[in-house]
Amino acid sequence: MKISYYPGCTLKTKAKDLDVTARLCAKALGVEMEEIENWQCCGAVYPMGTDEIATKLSAVRALDHAKHNGGKLLTLCSACHNVIKRTNEDMRSNEDIRFRANNYLKLDEPYKGETEVLHYLEMLKNVVGFDAIKKAVVKPLNRKIGAYYGCLLLRPSGVMAFDNPENPTIIEDFIRAIGGTPVTYPFRNECCGAYVALKNAELPKQKSRKVLTSAKEKGAEEVITACPLCLYNLQVNGDGILPVKYFTELLAEALGVQA
Amino acid sequence: MQEVTTEKKEFTPNIVAFCCNWCSYAGADLAGSSRLTYPANVKIIRVPCSCRVNPMFILKAFQQGADGVILCGCHPGDCHYVTGNYYTRRRMSLLFSFLSYMGIEKERTRVEWVSAAEGARFSAVMNDFVKTVTELGENKRLTDLRIKEGK
Amino acid sequence: MQRIGVFICWCGSNIAATVDVVKVAEVMKNEPGVVFSANYQYMCSENGQQLIKQAIKEHNLTGIVVGSCSPRMHEATFRKTAEAAGLNPYMVEIANIREHCSWIHKDMDEATEKAIILVRTAIAKVKLNAPLTAGESPVVKRALVIGGGIAGIQAALDIADAGFEVDIVEKNATIGGRMAQLDKTFPTLDCSACILTPKMVDCAQHEKIDILSYSEVEDVKGFVGNFNVKIRRKARYVDETKCTGCKVCMDKCPSKKGLNAFNMNLNTRPAIHIPFAQAIPNVAVIDPEQCIKLKTGKCGICQKFCGVGAIDYEQKDTFIERQYGAIVVATGFKPIALDAFNEYGYADNKDVITSLELERLMNAAGPTNGVLLRPSDGTHPKVITFIQCVGSRDSSGCGKPYCSKICCMYTAKHAMLLREKYPDTEVHVFYIDVRTPGKNYDEFYRRAVEQYGVDYIKGMVGKVYNENGKLMVQGSNLIDNEQITIESDLVVLATAIEPEPSVRKVATLLTASIDTNNFLTESHAKLRPVESPTAGVYLAGVCQGPKDIPETVSQASACAAKVIGLLVKDKLKTNPCVAIPDEMMCNGCSQCANVCAYGAITYVDKEFRLGGGKTEVRRVASVNPAVCQGCGACTVTCPSGAMDLKGFSSKQIMSEVEAICKK
Amino acid sequence: MTKEERIENIKKLSGTDVRKCMKCGKCSGRCPAFKDMDIKPHQFVTMLGKGKLDELLACKAIWNCLSCMACVERCPRGVAPAAVVEAVRDTVVRMQGNNGIKAEEIPPIVDELIPQQLLVSAYRKYNK
């Protein structure tokens, strides 16, 4: 099956590993990720100001494209997912934003939030199924792995509807599916602070150390994430307390697919 | 015959509101005791239950020159008489389709559920209904002209 | 020819400030049929009523219209006035010129014009009124109390002491309710069991009280004075009349892993059990989900050891039907589920507990025999942190928008008791506001602070997490504008309370209204706080709104007073505004009987004269006026227009419509 | 724009009703950047309600807020403190010359590993 896919800026450069492994694994699991044409950067952060329209248009373009190509839009980077999903909700339920964005875009028919935004993890869970993944695993990862959700996948939960915002389980279920032992630790849904790295170098350092220390204390041997920025921050500012990888890298390892 | 002033007056619709004694009439009382205003052209007729309202009453109101008729009852499931408002709901949907078949704007009639605790809602509903009917203008199709002009 | 009197009330300035009452009364003088019209400051006052009475007599009035407040307020008053002057009370109509006019309009001309129309409408109606006489219905001298907690117990005892029979229907195997689970009670710190269990025993021993435990109300028919209630007696697999409560079966039962609901699932109990030592009735019950015999057919040990042969694995649910004159609803509450509050770590940490769980941990009959031990490792906690308003005052959709009312006081109680019993503990309380109105309540809370050194922190907790075996409680301290983290051993959540979910079914059966939070609605928030809008149904305890024990007991006694006042009557006057068929027009089609929710309509074969000496037997509708509630559903459904409603006849309503529409 | 208009504008921009706040402090109890916030999350809400414009516009907290939405997620009254912070930041950034970060400051701090996402988001957050 084919799904429209939105890679995002970082996945084409610094986070190639995330993109490449994700595509290979999807293929191995029978899903073809079809990169949408002429996608533009989503802006990496959802603009909350109620008058922000122009900053949301690239997301709406991608959503409208997906609407006409299968109706689903697959995302991988947590930031892209957050921006696109929240923009989609605006287009669905906020009359003012919907009217003004459509006014700019002059699409053939106005976009009203019809597309379903799907994160790669949701695709694994709901389209492929964790049981199917378990069967496809050739090399079960016999390790203790900590899931790092961060903030972008979960919040605001009313819009993201990704998982329980305080007690998420989807990545833990994923870890079980690839033969690992999930380690739950209290800071898995705390922000790593990377957003302010350019302005305030100290804060992200403290926060990353806290996250990794917490994971280590509960017995994790490594930590996985879906966010290139979290990965960067935890790796650079986390003092090497634990190795940090993309979740798709572990999936590739378990499925035995090679980049 | 009295001389009618030629001064052009802004159209204010005449609205008949049927309210059930247990929920909506009490809701209207609460709107009053909470001083929540709505236009003076809404006049309320108290009935024991919304199911007491015969579609004939509504047609009669239109015939007599009402511009809008609204029927208020307890929320479905909360009827003081257990099932009365379910009958209302069914009867009125029939009446409404009959009215629209006759070419009467369906916005002139409305069924709303207002509980005894919903004074604010009662006022909001009435304001909205008056606004809707004002936009529609005078009810001409259903009025019995003999009644209007005979006076 | 009707002779109508019109009486316009000023209601002080309530009406007179926006409606020109003098003008309204003047205009009415010229209305056809009106022979008298007056205005007065307070028509409902003694003098006002005197004015009405006098006018009725002097002018020989056949009907009156009072332009005043809502009929829901004073219709009954003015009917009595009319009756006192010799006029049929149903020849009175009220024009609501206060709630529906003066209070909602600001422009005097506009309001006066509307008032005139409203009074004209009432005149149009009253001209078609007919004298009505209220019928009578008998009162069954027995009350039903639904729920056997402290509210139900108090109401039942008070009603029974007045000499009326009372049945308590309790869905659990014992009465006692939530109060039986509590350790101490505020503000005097008496032991809950010490003050509750004597009342439970009183109930059991009272000759007028019948306790139907492990039972639920299945169906309710009838009306005030004459409810017919079907009660399900759930199979307890133990013969209530034989069991002596010796507890041998509990010792011998091999299936001991059932969660003990009475102890908030903090320990286990056998499949056959008596919920707690002082249970009433002191009779065992078998949990069919847990019993090996009932699940697999093999075992039967309890039966073997029962000395009186009380065990009956074949027992089935049975149903009984009883008649009652009045019903008290006292279904109580439960703490909310904490699924939406994972930030407090309740699901992941055994040492994060609810306040009700703490009650059991502190109770001498509880799972730890009253020694406070952490559920996780059985150690004695040194630092205990309380979090208030967990799920209360929450309009985000996760919790309840209301204040649960009891938490501030019981948290102060817990904090105080802990500091007293274990002076080596450190106790912190996060609070948003401390709400302690009530006699000796604020003094109680201040004692916790001033005498027992409990640390009250104005702020809220954002996250509770486990780190190196400690519970880290991270929250704000708004007074110091700080974010603090308290390393705690035990965290107690003052969980919001909600009505016991079974109240929804009860409300539906009784057609009692329920609000958006599932609390039962009282008839009037201030003046009729224990009556449900459904006649003959009364509300006691938390089913009506959050309240503590003293308030619950007061409300229960108030309910009892209302019930006694009802049951002491031999007959009740019935509403005369009932349906009436025109037998000449009725064709016996049964449509009206089909829509009647009360079964008030039956059919009779009647002989009619056709003229010329011929007769004909026809099937026609017949309405039982004692059963008809006067909703009018049948009047609209009747295809031949034979059915009408007294007091709200089609002609009357049509004439009201005409009066409103007339320009 | 007058001060009052500016305040109203910030309220509108935030899309949140500050009057719903019951001053429980749960937002500040959870904020992961609390120590770096010179105006605390709960203060943003109350200060906007009181119209303390100058203090809000001059604070450092708008540059340190992580936009992690923890405060929004936890608020029992459905208020969004993070949206207030962002509305204040937007207001500051939209005033000429008030960008939070300048283009020429970037090259020296960029290392090899910094993902685009960080630069893009920093530009969007701090600049106009």
Image (cartoon, rainbow, N blue to C red):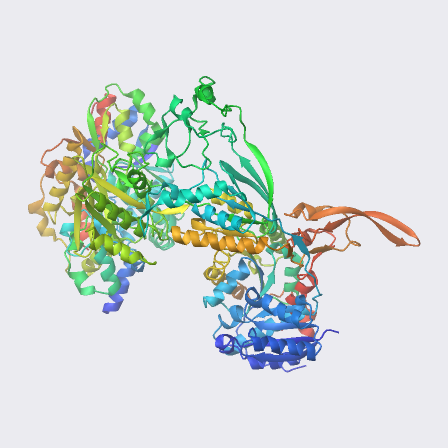
- Residue positioned 66% across, 76% down in the render: C5
Residue C388 in view: no
Q: What number of labels is visible?
A: 0
> Residue C20 location, x and y as percent?
54, 80
Quarter of the figure that contains the C terminus of chain C: bottom right
Residue B39 in view: yes
- Most extreme residue toward the right is C612
Closer to the camera in the image, C325 or C370: C370
> Residue C75 location, x and y as percent?
59, 67
Closer to the camera in the image, C39 or C569: C569
Instruction: Examine the image and state in which quarter residue C363 appears.
Output: top left
Q: Is residue B114 left or right of residue C599?
A: left
> Residue A75 location, x and y as percent?
28, 37
Q: Is residue A35 left or right of residue A217?
A: right
- Most extreme residue toward the top is C298
> Residue C451 location, x and y as percent?
20, 53
Q: Is residue B128 left or right of residue C654?
A: left
Closer to the camera in the image, C282 or B151: C282
B138 in relation to D69, above or below: below
Quarter of the figure that contains the N terminus of chain C: bottom right
- Residue positioned 17% across, 50% down in the render: C483
Q: Is residue C378 left or right of residue C114?
A: left
